Amino acid sequence: AGLLGHFNALSVRERDGATIVQNLLGFSPEIVADPTFLLTDSQWKSFAEMPDISTPYVLVYSFGSTHLEQLALEKAKQIHGIVINVNRSMPSANRQITRCVAPTPEQFVGLIYGAEYVVTNSFHGMALSLNLNKQFSLFLNTYSKAENTNPRFYSLAEMFEITNHIRNFDHGLSPDVVPYDIVNEHINSLREKSYHFLKKAIDD
């Protein structure tokens, strides 16, 4: 708390972080955008390296969940496509799934941009899907310390009015379409607010 009190400007990207700072210092910091939202969708798209894939695909970005793979396979059947999994863990035995291990940042963004649908249990899988206006479902994590990460999902989803796209582990994909007319208004507003905070913090 003593070190935090020496900063002239404090910001966090989630409400839980704001609560922690409030409890430590007695005031609420500014809640600003995750840095990924400071770029526009066109800036992200110009950065992307598109995959050489002609078939429609569902992208899985997860931390080793075969359940998410199975849901993605079901979605892929609906669109007559395939499943690509960006995964840092050991490959599964499911030969229906194409693995893309350790893509470059440009390739990773391109994989999300080119996907028909994204299935993820990652905060930045969700954030980049939103940035690029992709349809997606985000699944809560169930590992031992997931209570430290799952609130981040709700904080962002509540800001953008899409909590129905957060799914429990035993749920299927969200039946709803992400309303990007509403979401993009929220993103633009949050980006402007965050730029204003940064400019004021630097100028002061």
Image (cartoon, rainbow, N blue to C red):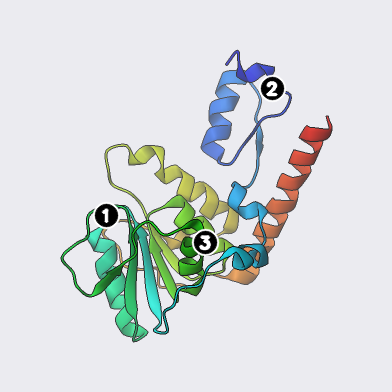
| Element on which disc 3 rests | helix
What residue does disc 2 label?
7
Residue 200: quadrant of the picture:
top right
| Element on which disc 1 rests | loop
Q: Nearer the viewer, residue 64 or 86?
A: 86
Q: Nearer the viewer, residue 95 or 159?
A: 95
Question: How many residues crowd around disc 2 within 10 Å: few (fewer than 14), some, or many (20 or more)?
Answer: few
Q: Residue at x 41, y 42 (%)?
A: 149
What residue does disc 1 label?
64
Q: Nearer the viewer, residue 10 or 55?
A: 55
Taking the view exactly as shown, the residue that stands out farthest to the bottom is 80
Residue 7: quadrant of the picture:
top right
Q: CA distance from mark 1 to mark 3?
A: 22 Å
Q: What amino acid type should be assigned to the residue bearing mark 2?
A: Phe
200 shown above or below 24: below
Residue 177 in view = no
Please state if 149 lies on the left or on the right of 66 as rendered: right
Residue 172 x, y percent position in the rendering: 31, 67
Q: If the image is split into quadrants, where does the N terminus sit?
A: top right
Residue 67 x, y percent position in the rendering: 24, 62
Q: CA distance from mark 3 to mark 2?
A: 34 Å
Please state if 81 lies on the left or on the right of 104 as rendered: left
Mark with earlier residue (3, 2): 2
Residue 180: quadrant of the picture:
bottom right
* Number of the label disc, if any, that sits on residue 106: 3
